[in-house]
Image (cartoon, grey):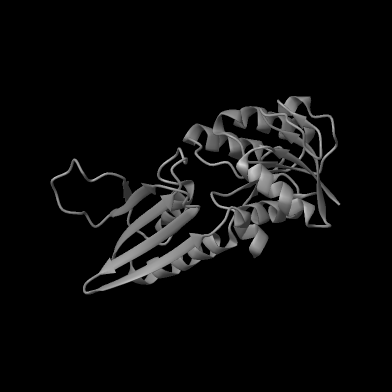
Amino acid sequence: MIRIILCGANGKMGKVIQSVVSSRDDSEIVAGVDINTSEAPFPVYSNISEVKEEADVIIDFTNPSLLSGLLNFATTKKIPVVIGTTGFDEKQKNQIKAASEKTAVFFTYNMSIGINLLANLAKKAAQILSNDFDIEIIEKHHNQKIDAPSGTALMLADAICEEITEPMKYEYDRHSKREKRTKNEIGLHAVRGGTIVGEHDIIFAGRDEIITLSHSARSKEIFAVGAVNAAVFMAGKAEGLYSMKEMID
């Protein structure tokens, strides 16, 4: 039985993860961390440093501002950590990489297997189409999402760039420009509205033809299932930086 510490236990994703874990027989949540310490089927602490329970892995769906405390706890206790939080800046991404030298860290911009398959398909498409097709990425999320573009959109753009020999630049905003689109750019566009869970479209636009790769998330449960699968996968892993690629290969 894999013992989990759940950071963000009483948030929206935390509640979904609780439901997913309760339906499985290979894992259990032994402690939670949340600013809201209301009643749960396990002890909930306001700070991860207060957690006393022994655990095999940590799942984090909180806020980027809490990263330092999370990584300090994980590296000190040598507990693998699955990071599902998004919106990190470059300094924080470097913190994650540094922590992976001391403990096992699973870091991905999206816990959905479907999104990671989409990234692989986009890489294949870029190999074939990038010389003659313009590439645009449109992401849509609910009106409560803070960061834009989404971490997943950036992950998809990064994956595409791995297959293109010429250096590409990301174009986030064209409204202030009075010039035509350049060849070496990938446009990233964010839509925020309603309760959209998450939609990503990658458009390859060529001469007289358009190819679109799409993924639509219909509920948060797909991310929760992915996070719990990652937690089970990470238990007992040696230090290092892991992603969905290692889990599905």
Q: Is residue 200 left or right of residue 84?
A: left
Q: Is residue 35 left or right of residue 120?
A: right
Residue pictured at 53% horizontal, 42% vertical = 86
Residue 102 position within the rendered picture, expressed as x and y whole percent measured from the top left? 71, 37
Q: Is residue 153 left or right of residue 31?
A: left
Residue 115 position within the rendered picture, expressed as x and y whole percent measured from the top left? 52, 60
Who is closer to the viewer here, 196 or 75? 196
Look at the picture and state if 198 lies above or below 210.
above
Q: How many marks?
A: 0
Residue 132 seen by the camera: no
Residue 9 seen by the camera: yes
Who is closer to the viewer here, 99 or 171? 171
Q: Residue furthest left?
A: 178
Quadrant for residue 182, please give it: bottom left
Residue 69 position within the rendered picture, expressed as x and y whole percent measured from the top left? 66, 27
Look at the picture and state if 35 lies above or below 204.
above
Residue pictured at 81% horizontal, 33% vertical = 43
Quadrant for residue 211, please give it: bottom left
Residue 185 position within the rendered picture, expressed as x and y whole percent measured from the top left? 29, 53
Quadrant for residue 112, please give it: bottom right
Q: Quadrant of the C terminus?
A: bottom right
Look at the picture and state if 122 lies above or below 197.
below
Q: Is residue 168 left or right of residue 159?
A: left
